[in-house]
Image: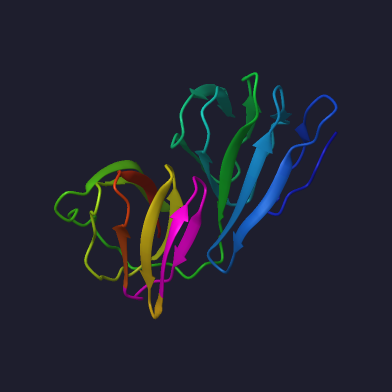
């Protein structure tokens, strides 16, 4: 069985069951699709005319074939960057369903000015996972009651929740405090004041994707 999804990914296969794609976000900078792969489901190898960021959301053995290289992930928060026009495919080798996000980085986006990484606020840890001409991906851990000050970036920002937590988000004039499930995405336009805070009694982790 094959299915076409919003970001242009095709040929997702599983015996007797099709993967379930859900469009999470689509604007002039990025298109994000959430995909559930049943056990044994796989994509046919394919390419895109744009770069793609793949993020594993659930535990389980995920394989990503990138050209001739086979890479295996097993935990939430694993990240793969696939350059434009690069043959690749995802498959689920687990006995249970797994979920991934695919973020398509649009080629006609307005480029952002160069900006170096910033220092993490006290108590918040940041680990850079990817840094190239298209994106900088940082894994951030917020301790209980950890918060960052209101600030801006010269680039558009996409955040992806990796672990569950009660998160307070300020995005311009919008404010919300909600329980965020893994896979929750937030788009923060460039130069708009924003801040994240942990409103929970336990830590949470998210990915911060700076789109260049």
- 180 part of magenta stretch: yes
Residue 206 pos. (x, y %): 38, 47
Q: Residue at x 75, y 42 (%)?
A: 10
Q: Is residue 183 visible?
A: yes
The N terminus: image quadrant:
top right
Q: Quadrant of residue 153?
A: bottom left
- 153 part of magenta stretch: no
Along the horizontal axis of the image, is 16 left or right of 67?
right
Q: Residue at x 61, y 43 (%)?
A: 85
Q: Quadrant of residue 43?
A: top right
What is the magenta range? 175-193
Residue 123 pos. (x, y %): 16, 49
Residue 135 pos. (x, y %): 41, 52
Q: Residue at x 61, y 63 (%)?
A: 26
- Which residue is the extreme one toward the bottom? 173
Residue 94 pos. (x, y %): 61, 20
Residue nearer the viewer, 130 or 94 = 94
């Amino acid at each position: 069985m094959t299915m076409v999804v919003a970001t242009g990914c095709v040929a997702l296969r599983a015996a007797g069951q099709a993967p379930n794609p859900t469009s999470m976000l689509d604007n002039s900078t990025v298109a994000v699709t959430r995909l559930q792969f049943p056990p044994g489901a796989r994509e046919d190898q394919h390419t895109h005319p744009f770069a793609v960021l793949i993020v594993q959301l659930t535990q389980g053995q995920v394989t990503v074939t990138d050209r001739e290289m086979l890479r295996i992930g097993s935990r939430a928060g694993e990240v793969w960057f696939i350059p434009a026009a690069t043959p690749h495919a995802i498959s689920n080798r687990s006995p249970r369903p797994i979920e991934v996000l695919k973020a398509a980085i649009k080629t006609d986006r307005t480029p952002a000015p160069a900006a170096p990484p910033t220092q993490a606020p006290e108590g918040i840890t940041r680990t850079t996972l990817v840094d190239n001409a298209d994106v900088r991906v940082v894994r951030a851990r917020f301790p209980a009651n950890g918060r960052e000050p209101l600030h801006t970036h010269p680039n558009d920002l996409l955040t992806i929740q990796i672990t569950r937590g009660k998160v307070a988000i300020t995005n311009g004039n919008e404010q919300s405090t909600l329980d965020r499930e893994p896979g929750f995405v937030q788009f923060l336009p460039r130069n708009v004041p924003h801040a994240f805070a942990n409103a929970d009694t336990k830590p949470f982790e998210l990915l911060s994707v700076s789109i260049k």
